[in-house]
Image (spheres, rainbow, N blue to C red):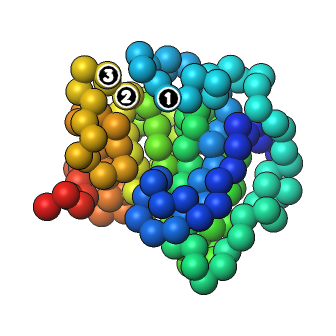
Amino acid sequence: MKVQVAGIVNESVTDGVGFRTTIFFQGCNHHCLGCHNPHTWAFDGGNEFEVEELISQIPYSPLIKGITLSGGDPFFQPQAASLIARDCKTHEKDVWAYTGFTWEQLMGEGDADKLELLKACDVLVDGPYEQSLMCFDLPFRGSSNQRLIAVQDSLRVGSIVEIRLEE
Ligand code: SF4
């Protein structure tokens, strides 16, 4: 399986808790006003990898707490992103994912591939970037509409469980 990627950053501390490898997926049609990564919008941009090739480049050192699937939007390539996330779990690391879809959209849409990806994640940062709600004080997100969602807890109880790092 192929995956279209805008870039990979190792030892990031800005895309989730701890040192992380962040994979920026290429392709996004949310087109949020004020998006910091508009070069990731085009679905034919970036670089194409075999998923296995990309996985082999992720350094699962003891230093790394986990991976972050960002973009772009990984939920536009859910099958490839799921493979990467599931491999990460075999290394006993955690998976964060950023998406312009809301939790409600992902759950309500009934897209099996997107739901599979969601189930492979530990933390979801959901929703589009809203320039009018921009906030510098919120850890790991750009606007106050976006939520840090504890995915496994939310799936277990059937409603959104937010993570409050700022408290
Ligand atoms: S979802 Fe993210 S990458 Fe896509 S347009 Fe919005 S801010 Fe940019």
* Quarter of the figure with the C terminus: bottom left
Q: How crowded is mark 2: few (under 14 residues within 10 Å), some or many (20 or more)?
A: many
Choose between 154 and 3: the one closer to the eye.
3
Q: Do the residues labelled 2 and 3 touch (CB within 8 Å)?
A: yes
* Mark 1 / mark 2, whichever is N-terminal: 1
Secondary structure beneath label 3 = helix
Ligand 1 is within 8 Å of the C-beta of the residue at disc 2: yes
Q: Assess mark 1: CB under 8 A from ligand 1?
A: yes
Residue at position x 31%, y 22% in the image = 131
First in sequence: mark 1 vs mark 3? 1
- Picture quadrant where residue 90 is located: bottom right
Residue drawn at x 76%, y 25% as measured from the top left: 45
To which residue does mark 1 refer? 36
Q: Position of residue 3 (x, y in %)?
A: 77, 41
Please, what is the three-letter code of the amino acid marked with disc 1? His
* Label 2 sits on residue: 129
In the image: residue 86, left or right of residue 147 = right
* 70 over 56 or under it: above or below: above
The residue at which mark 3 appears reads as: 131
Q: Position of residue 127 (x, y in %)?
A: 36, 33
